[in-house]
Image (cartoon, rainbow, N blue to C red):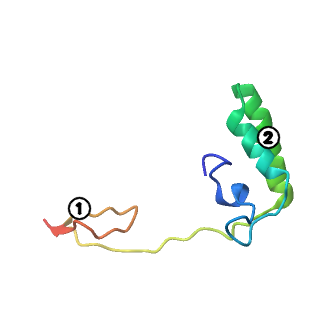
Amino acid sequence: MLSPQTHFYVANTCSDDPGGSRDAAMPPLLAALAKAPTQDARRKIAAAIQKLAYDLAPAVSWGQFTIPAAYRSSLAGLVLELLMFWDVSKA
């Protein structure tokens, strides 16, 4: 979500996936952002992208959640942020 060019709800125009915005103004703004020669030009285009994204409201966040989990202290190799169990072993 660091860039409007890779943000699913901002950059999606229903060309590949249904359910996104069909506004024709967003693709030219995203293309202009990619070609902007200066940081100031990128800021101005990004402001226009943000305003259009808020006007379109392509998504509404319903909140965040976490799944509580507990692990034995004798396990090694856990990647807790991703909940991956690859390469886990008893210490």
> In the figure, is residue 57 to the left or right of 5?
right
The residue lying at 73 percent from left, 45 percent from top is 30
Looking at marks 1 and 2 on the same chain, the residue that comes earlier in the sequence is marked by 2
| Residue at the disc numbered 2 | 47
Dot 1 surroundings within 10 Å: few (below 14), some, or many (20 or more)? few
43 above or below 23? above
In-front residue for pair 31/91: 31
Residue 28, percent from left and from top: 80, 45
Q: Secondary structure at mark 1?
A: loop
Q: Evaluate whether residue 30 shows in this view.
A: yes
Residue 12, percent from left and from top: 70, 60
> In the figure, is residue 70 to the left or right of 45?
left
Occupied quadrant, residue 11: bottom right
Could you say which disc has been placed on residue 77 in the image? Answer: 1
Dot 2 surroundings within 10 Å: few (below 14), some, or many (20 or more)? few
Q: Secondary structure at mark 2?
A: helix
In-front residue for pair 60/43: 43
49 above or below 35? below
Occupied quadrant, residue 75: bottom left
The residue lying at 70 percent from left, 26 percent from top is 37
Q: Amino acid at mark 2?
A: Ala
Q: CB under 8 Å between callouts 1 and 2? A: no
Of labels 1 and 2, the one closer to you: 2
Q: Evaluate whether residue 74 shows in this view.
A: no
Q: CA distance from mark 1 to mark 2?
A: 43 Å
Residue 55, percent from left and from top: 86, 56
Q: Amino acid at mark 1?
A: Gly
The residue lying at 82 percent from left, 55 percent from top is 54
Residue 91, percent from left and from top: 13, 65
> In the figure, is residue 62 to the left or right of 57?
left
